[in-house]
Amino acid sequence: MSTDKKWNVLFIEDVRSMFDSDTKMLNQLFNKVDKVQEKEEALKLFDTNQYDIIIGDISVEPESVGLLKQIKDKKPKQAIFALVSPKDTDKLFGIADLGMNAFELTPEQFDQALEQISMFNPCE
């Protein structure tokens, strides 16, 4: 469901990400965006801030889903989106089984995925 509200987002990116986390779309579509690359920093920010949506880039290392699961275990109702490379399509069902949303996308589809995520209402 679409809403005019802009959400606070924690974007967990991989240092070797195939996505451009410096895209202007992040700041245009969301109220506040904190970008991190380290697991410890991500958990610290998550514990000390209120985020509407967590976006996890697992395009390089799909095993990073463990961090997203850890966040989900801490706050089961947290809205989480995992960004998955087309080469890791087999991971999509496992991510869904963990109660998270997933996008299989190429770098060219990144801004479009962000637009779709921004329309998601985590309060519902």
Image (cartoon, rainbow, N blue to C red):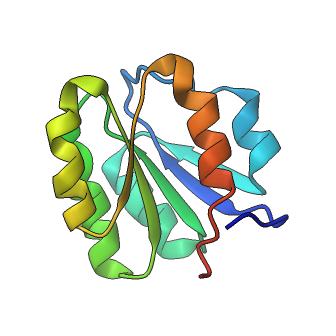
Residue 21 visible somewhere in the drawing: no
Q: Residue furthest right?
A: 4
> Residue 39 in the image: x percent, y percent?
32, 50
Towards the viewer: 4 or 71: 4
> Position of 118 compared to 62: left or right?
right
> Residue 88 in the image: x percent, y percent?
20, 31
- Where, by quadrant of the figure, is residue 38 drawn? top left
> Residue 19 in the image: x percent, y percent?
49, 24
- Where, by quadrant of the figure, is residue 72 drawn? bottom left
Towards the viewer: 41 or 71: 71
Give the vertical position of 19 relative to 120 (above or below).
above
- Where, by quadrant of the figure, is residue 16 drawn? top left
Q: Residue furthest front?
A: 1
Towards the viewer: 59 or 121: 121
Quadrant that contains the N terminus:
bottom right
Residue at position x 68%, y 62% from top? 8
Quadrant that contains the C terminus:
bottom right
> Position of 29 compared to 23: left or right?
right
Give the vertical position of 43 relative to 38 (above or below).
below
Residue at position x 55%, y 63% from top? 53
Give the vertical position of 99 relative to 32 (above or below).
below
Residue at position x 81%, y 67% from top? 5
Q: How many marks?
A: 0
Towards the viewer: 79 or 9: 79
Residue 16 visible somewhere in the drawing: yes
Residue at position x 40%, y 24% from top? 17
Give the vertical position of 77 relative to 119 (above or below).
below
